[in-house]
Image (cartoon, rainbow, N blue to C red):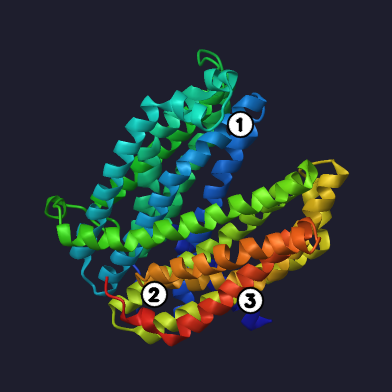
Amino acid sequence: MTSLYYSIRKYLRYFLEALKGGEQDFTEGNLNKAIFLLSIPMIIEMSMESIFAVVDVFFVSKVSVNAVATVGLTESVMMIVYSVAVGLSMAATATVARRIGEKNHQAASVAAVQAIILGLTFALVIGLAGAFYAREILQIMGGSPELIAEGYGYTRWIFLGNVSLMLIFLINAIFRGAGDASIAMWALFLANAINCVLDPLFIFGFGPIPAMGVEGAAIATTTGRSIGVVFQVYHLFKGNSRIKITIRSLVVKWDILKNMIKVSIGGVGQFLIESASWIFLMRVMSLFGESALAGYTISFRVLVFTLMPSWGLANAAGTLVGQNLGALKPDRAETSVWRTALINVVFLGIVGAVFLIFAEEVIAIFTPDEAVVSFGTQSLQIICLGYVFFAYGMVLIQAFNGAGDTRTPSVINIFVFWIFQIPFAYWLAVTMGWGPSGVFWAIAVAHSLLAIIGVIIFRRGRWKTVKV
């Protein structure tokens, strides 16, 4: 009992330390502590990102059906921006982590500047084009004249604000790579808090603030993220982080830019390959009616929400891999991956057990429709059977990315999601007559296969030789 008491006190102290942040060397000392200090703020950060989307949809759904459809159509096009942001973030994390591991903080700061230059250039070009052609974008995506008239303002603001989206993604990735995960967490917490307050004010109006409808949601989101970026930039220049941007850092390094583009292409590919595969699965699900599609959609949102903390753990593994490879400690890098994966297995194993038992009650929170609840329950229970494999797969993929090897996960994703999962889902669901459950089983099996392939390739150790 005494040892349990002291263990609880120790990890409570670690928890507070993780929230506070501060100078830490993750290439030395207790590895369990390093994983804990990195993962806690990253888990909270990922949870904040999922809450961002939920809050927007909750308030917009009170406006009109067209408003919700506008958000959906705009988000589909914005997938390009998200994919580039994710890809550049992977490259930034890997490069900065490697320089920090080498104890070369100046080089890490220079690398951070190159990542920001790349992100800004892309975001400005896409933002201006998207804002100028907002009506045309909604028209191409199939929006009705009424939808376009009501929602083009939302699309215009989202594209104009994509600079803040790109930067908050990118700079948080820089902080994570440096091991300053608490700053990334607080930046997103601030942006989220402002968005939660401004969303209802701008959408429905309050006092002198006019009701702006769905356009108000875009303005609130852009404002929240922009203030989050200001907070990030303040810490970049203030120098209370391992990354400190000075006049010496503000230079263009073409060799670093070229390498970042090379690494980020793999990251962009990973995101597009996996996200596009979900679109095809949705198409297969649509063959079985609206209730099946709705049940699957709700279960998917629930799954994503619970998987976000796991992505926080996976990001911690990526940072530890990058920094320890930079410190020429590949064995410590590998050990950190296996330990983080084990923690993730325990977490998702518990979540999976809860879903197996209470899936129906969870889905019923979102809809009273019995048919939708039935399909959603089936989806949640079958897919969560693969949660243990999900846990390993996430951590291993981020370990490759943290090492700067974004090509390997892209190849794995192409094989697992396109060559295997989509045909397998169609075969089970349509050819074999399993219906929607065929799609659910295909997802569970595909992610299990991804984890198995990831383990085999990771054990070969070629990721330890990647130069960043």
Residue 256 position in % (x across, y down): 20, 61
Q: Residue 5 carries which label?
A: 3
Residue 301 appears in the rendering: no
Three-letter residue code for mark 1: Ala
Label 3 vs label 1: CA separation? 52 Å
Relative to 452, residue 71 above or below: above
Identify the residue shown where x is 25% and y is 69%.
Answer: 99
Near mark 1 (Cα within 10 A), the count class, few <14, some 14-19 or many ≥20, is some
Residue 91 position in % (x across, y down): 33, 61
- Of badges 1 and 2, the one in the foreground is 1
Q: Nearer the viewer, residue 232 or 287?
A: 287
Task: Determine which residue is flagged by label 1.
Answer: 69
Identify the residue shown where x is 32% and y is 68%.
Answer: 97
Q: Which mark is residue 321?
A: 2
Mark 1 touching mark 2, by CB under 8 A? no
82 relative position to 109: left or right: right
Dot 1 falls on a residue whose secondary structure is helix
Dot 3 falls on a residue whose secondary structure is helix
| Quadrant in which the C terminus is drawn | bottom left
Q: Nearer the viewer, residue 82 or 53?
A: 82
Label 1 vs label 2: CA separation? 41 Å
Mark 1 or mark 2: whose residue is earlier in sequence: 1
Label 3 vs label 2: CA separation? 32 Å
